[in-house]
Image: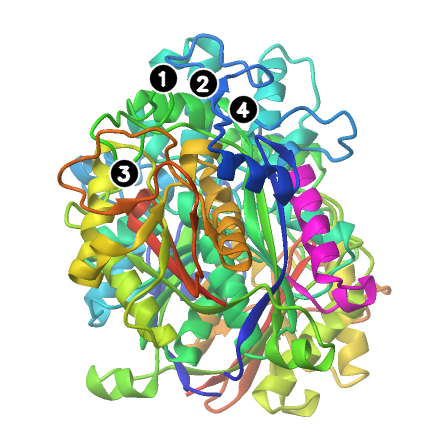
């Protein structure tokens, strides 16, 4: 590694968890107490077979005057970035690398809807300018006066971990010493409708469970601050994790919206990440899996894990069974682990799937222990990240 | 981080059809592809001109963006003489701003009447073109889509170069794509940013951009691989930098601070004090062109006034997420053929505040050792890439 990369701090907002502290309580509990409270009641797209974690319309993350100038995607991002800036100093050369699966789909829909139902002449310039994928990253840069690189990465559910790696690479190369990484997502009618069409959703998220039927999408945002050793010293940061290695791969047998069969490509991804980190399978203490409750996706990841770890599988956790898929929930769980929190076994898990051969468990990460974080997106992208807790 | 990164193949799809050859011939002849739109018929829009790609009956992909991505990559791989076995560990670094939005719009109209399936909504995902490309060529390396509006594909080229220098991969296909869609067409019109008569970048007559569509692809390979396989190098990518204005969602920084920063860092990265030629972003909007020139001047000083400039959007329109890709293809051609295309054939009244030297009239025939490709985007994203002989 040319430059050492540390995770300094992070923040998060998701339905029912307005800060990382809330998120920790939620993840330690194994699921929402009043789960229905966080399920949208919009009858258009939700039914008994599919649910979504969506912010209650009364949730005000930003002052009304500020909020009305941007879409919800940016509101989540600005709320989290502002909270983060209250915890740590963020210098002006900082880069912002953001992952999003669907982007500002709400405003894109508004523009298309205006064109179709009214007239192209009635399209609002505001709606259009907010319909660009990097708007949230741009708004963070504008709000915090940041002049480093500003990027949006989109690889479906792997977007957030992919964005983390883009930011880490920037520090690794020595191009910058502080980077904000993470992701943001809004879940709209169209998103849920299309996910229902693909039979991806369920009313119960139970990753790796024999009776899993799909996942629950969640909107929200999570951001982390990465820094190199020099920035740690200069800004008196206290790192919570050290990035050891990463890798990215693709499964060409995947479809537009369906996992493929090529788990060996995922195995190669984990292998290359371990090589970069200078660790072996024996050194991995915990696996933060990508499993969301999807029938094919969970099985693909399980096959890859069983092959790569070859009978020596460490504890596997599946936080998406608690807080849902999208909105960088994987990074929120990583932050909770690095801050000493525990991730519970999802409440909805019933029975081990014999084809999978293991169950997710409750776990926390001790100091100096190593976690492997995986992303396994339905469009074929795999990402593996290896982090040691400081 | 070791060695250098070579461009060994290029491919394009533009308003002049499939391939780099028709594109290059057209720009050298000063032939514009900006016309009254036919295939993409913008009924009810404020304007009706743009640079559309001719219809291809052999289209075999779900969206135009995916199809053009594969077509341009195929040409680039052929040009680079890359064998399919080498592609297994290759990477795909692709830029895209609107993905399959055009197809989604067509479906959306039917959805409102409840007469269609929702499957095409997955095509809209920004990553659909890059994924299609990876599937088509059975690529198992990193596949990443960058969506930073008009710098998307330039960002993708920068990150592909970085991934090769970091040793993650040895070969990458890098570039980007976008197809005309009503969202962007109506959107830019709502901002009054489209010139109904075709864009006139850097002139005093400029009154907005012209939208275009298509794809541009580069095959990038490590220096080590080029040496081992004795590959023909079209150009070296010696620098790639992106910065943020941190200023406004749609307007560029008035003094071009962000792009100045990107150019200065790119020149420093490539170890150069100046550059032989600049391939401009030059959309033709009042704010963009002046901001871009101020950024160039701010970085290069008076020497900027003597550098021959080319504004490719005069011929191919603004490809948005695909702009940096196809413009990089043209930059590489400038190096390999030692010709800088003219931006205008006839004399035009230049903006008096822009003191740059646009090539006008005949193409400028001279040895081009280095080219700077500049792109600016919504959200204040700026990129600068240096290609060298």
Q: Is residue B291 left or right of residue A377?
A: left
Subunit under mark 2? B
Residue B227, by quadrant, is bottom right
For marks 1 and 4, give the one nearer the viewer: 1
Task: Name the residue carrying label 1.
Answer: B196
Subunit under mark 1? B
Farthest right residue in view: A355
Rounded to the nearest angstrom, the CA distance separating label 2 from label 1 is 6 Å
Task: Name the residue carrying label 3.
Answer: B250
Q: Is residue A81 left or right of residue A52?
A: left
- In the image, what residue occupies the spot 65% across and 73% down? B170
Q: Earlier in the sequence, mark 3 or mark 1?
A: 1
Q: Position of residue A178 (x, y in %)?
A: 31, 73
In this picture, which residue range is highlighted in magenta?
A: B66-91
Task: Name the residue carrying label 4.
Answer: A43
Rounded to the nearest angstrom, the CA distance separating label 3 from label 1 is 20 Å
Q: Position of residue B157 (x, y in %)?
A: 51, 59
């Amino acid at each position: 590694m040319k430059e050492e990369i540390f995770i300094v701090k992070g923040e998060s907002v998701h339905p029912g968890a307005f800060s990382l502290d809330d998120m920790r309580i939620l993840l330690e509990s194994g699921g929402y107490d009043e789960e229905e409270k966080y399920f949208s009641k919009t009858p258009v797209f939700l039914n008994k077979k599919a649910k979504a974690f969506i912010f209650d319309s009364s949730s005000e993350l930003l002052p009304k005057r500020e909020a009305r100038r941007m879409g919800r995607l940016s509101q989540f991002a600005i709320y989290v970035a502002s909270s983060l800036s209250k915890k740590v100093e963020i210098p002006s050369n900082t880069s912002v690398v953001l992952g999003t699966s669907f982007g500002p789909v709400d405003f894109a829909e508004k523009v298309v809807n205006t064109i179709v139902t009214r007239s192209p002449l009635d399209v609002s310039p505001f709606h259009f300018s907010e319909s660009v994928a990097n708007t949230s990253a741009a708004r963070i840069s504008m709000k915090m006066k940041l002049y480093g690189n500003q990027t949006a990465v989109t690889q479906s559910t792997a977007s957030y971990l992919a964005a983390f790696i883009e930011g880490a690479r920037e520090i690794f190369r020595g191009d910058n010493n502080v980077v904000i990484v993470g992701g943001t997502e809004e879940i709209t009618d169209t998103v849920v409708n299309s996910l229902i069409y693909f039979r991806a959703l369920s009313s119960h998220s139970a990753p790796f469970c024999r009776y899993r039927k799909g996942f629950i999408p969640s909107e929200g945002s999570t951001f982390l601050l990465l820094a190199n050793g020099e920035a740690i010293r200069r800004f008196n940061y206290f790192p919570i994790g050290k990035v050891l290695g990463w890798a990215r791969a693709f499964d060409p047998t995947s479809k537009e919206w369906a996992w493929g069969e090529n788990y060996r490509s995922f195995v190669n991804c984990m292998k290359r990440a371990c090589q970069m980190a200078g660790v072996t399978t024996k050194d991995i203490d915990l696996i933060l899996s990508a499993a969301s409750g999807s029938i094919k996706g969970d099985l693909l990841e399980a096959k890859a894990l069983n092959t790569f770890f070859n009978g020596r599988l460490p504890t596997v956790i599946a936080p998406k069974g608690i807080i849902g898929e999208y909105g960088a929930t994987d990074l929120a769980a990583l932050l909770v682990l690095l801050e000493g929190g525990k991730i519970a076994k999802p409440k909805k898990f019933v029975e081990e799937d014999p084809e999978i051969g293991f169950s997710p468990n409750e776990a926390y990460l001790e100091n100096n222990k190593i976690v492997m974080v995986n992303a396994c997106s339905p469009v074929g992208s795999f990402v593996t990240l290896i982090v040691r807790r400081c | 981080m070791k060695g250098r990164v070579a461009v060994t193949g290029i491919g394009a799809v533009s308003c002049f059809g499939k391939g780099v050859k028709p594109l290059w011939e057209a720009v050298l002849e000063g032939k514009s592809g900006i016309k009254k739109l036919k295939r993409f018929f913008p009924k009810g829009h404020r304007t009706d001109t743009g640079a559309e790609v001719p219809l291809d009956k052999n289209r075999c992909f779900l969206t135009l963006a995916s199809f053009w991505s594969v077509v341009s990559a195929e040409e680039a791989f052929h040009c680079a003489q890359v064998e399919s076995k080498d592609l297994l560990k290759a990477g795909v670094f692709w830029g895209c701003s609107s993905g399959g939005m055009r197809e989604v719009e067509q479906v959306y109209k039917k959805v409102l009447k409840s007469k269609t399936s929702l499957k095409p909504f997955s095509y809209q995902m920004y990553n659909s073109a890059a994924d299609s490309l990876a599937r088509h060529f059975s690529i198992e390396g990193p596949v990443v889509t960058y969506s930073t509006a008009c710098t998307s594909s330039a960002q993708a080229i920068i990150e592909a170069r970085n991934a090769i220098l970091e040793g993650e991969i040895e070969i990458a296909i890098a570039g980007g794509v976008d197809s005309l869609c009503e969202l962007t067409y109506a959107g830019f019109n709502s901002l009054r940013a489209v010139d109904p008569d075709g864009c006139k970048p850097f002139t005093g007559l400029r009154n907005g951009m012209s939208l275009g569509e298509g794809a541009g692809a580069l095959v990038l390979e490590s220096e080590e691989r080029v040496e081992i396989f004795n590959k023909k190098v079209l150009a070296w990518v010696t620098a790639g930098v992106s910065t943020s204005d941190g200023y406004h969602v749609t307007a560029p920084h008035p003094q071009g601070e962000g792009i100045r920063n990107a150019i200065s860092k790119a020149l420093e990265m490539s170890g150069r004090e100046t550059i032989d030629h600049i391939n401009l972003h030059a959309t033709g909007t009042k704010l963009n062109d002046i901001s871009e020139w101020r950024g160039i001047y701010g970085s290069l000083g008076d020497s900027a006034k003597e550098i021959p400039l080319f504004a490719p959007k005069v011929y191919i329109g603004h490809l948005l997420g695909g702009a940096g890709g196809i413009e990089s293809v043209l930059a590489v051609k400038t190096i390999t053929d030692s010709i800088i295309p003219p931006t205008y054939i006839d004399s035009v009244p230049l903006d008096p505040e822009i003191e740059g030297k646009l090539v006008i009239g005949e193409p400028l025939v001279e040895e081009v050792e280095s080219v700077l490709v500049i792109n600016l985007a919504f959200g204040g994203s700026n990129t600068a890439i240096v290609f060298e002989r």
